[in-house]
Amino acid sequence: MRKPVPDLEMEIVDSLPGFSCRRCARCCTGKVIALYDRDMERIRSHVKERYCERTSTVERALTGARYKMRMVDGGCVFLEKGLCRHYDLRPNTCRRHPFIVSEGHKLVASTCPGVEWSSEQGEGEYRSLSKGIAEKIDLFLDNHAR
Ligand code: SF4
Ligand code: SF4
């Protein structure tokens, strides 16, 4: 079963579909790429340029993150010619995309062309990567989508 979530460009699903990234960089433009402490530690030990900026009050309420990736001309500051310049350092937000998995919900980004709806996969890795944001998403769904 797939149920759209208003405002989030995501769908609630019963089980995670398959996924194979098409490298379209759609998830690197026009989005809030939330940064958590572990992300900041990983990136700042290797990157000297200004890569982050503060989240707005609304963004913080939704993600729980105080910082997000800096956007330049609508795209992530690490995006260059359609590729991530620091792929090995990318935030967990990027690693788990297009999925957010919590105890309560499984969500899939409806705009990601790499989602393979005809197959299924396990959720373990995505569940661990979703820690932090999953609680906030559950709260959001409690208020908006039930
Ligand atoms: S995760 Fe999805 S949206 Fe992002 S680059 Fe891969 S296919 Fe495109
Ligand atoms: S850090 Fe890399 S993968 Fe993540 S949004 Fe920026 S360019 Fe895309």
Image (cartoon, grey):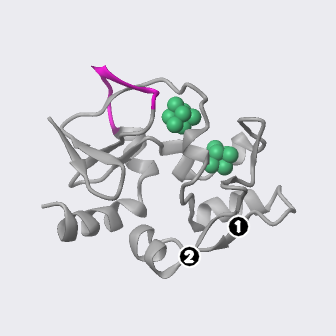
Residue with the most extreme top position:
118
Residue shown at 41% from the left, 58% from the top: 131
Q: Which residues are magenta?
A: 113-123
Residue 137 in the image: state x and y as whole percent.
32, 62
Q: Is residue 79 left or right of residue 110?
A: right
Q: Which residue is mark 2?
A: 66
Residue furthest front as drawn: 73
Mark number displayed over residue 87? none
136 above or below 73? below
Q: Which residue is mark 1?
A: 52
Q: Quadrant of residue 84?
A: top right
Around disc 2, counting alpha carbons within 10 Å, would you say few (fewer than 14), some (14 to 19), or many (20 or more)?
some
Residue 79 position in % (x across, y down): 73, 45
- Does the segment drawn in magenta span residue 70? no
Dot 2 falls on a residue whose secondary structure is loop
How far across and how far down the image is residue 70, in percent?
A: 69, 63
Of the residues shown, which amino acid type is indicated by label 2?
A: Arg
Of the numbered discs 2 and 1, the one sitting upstream in the chain is: 1
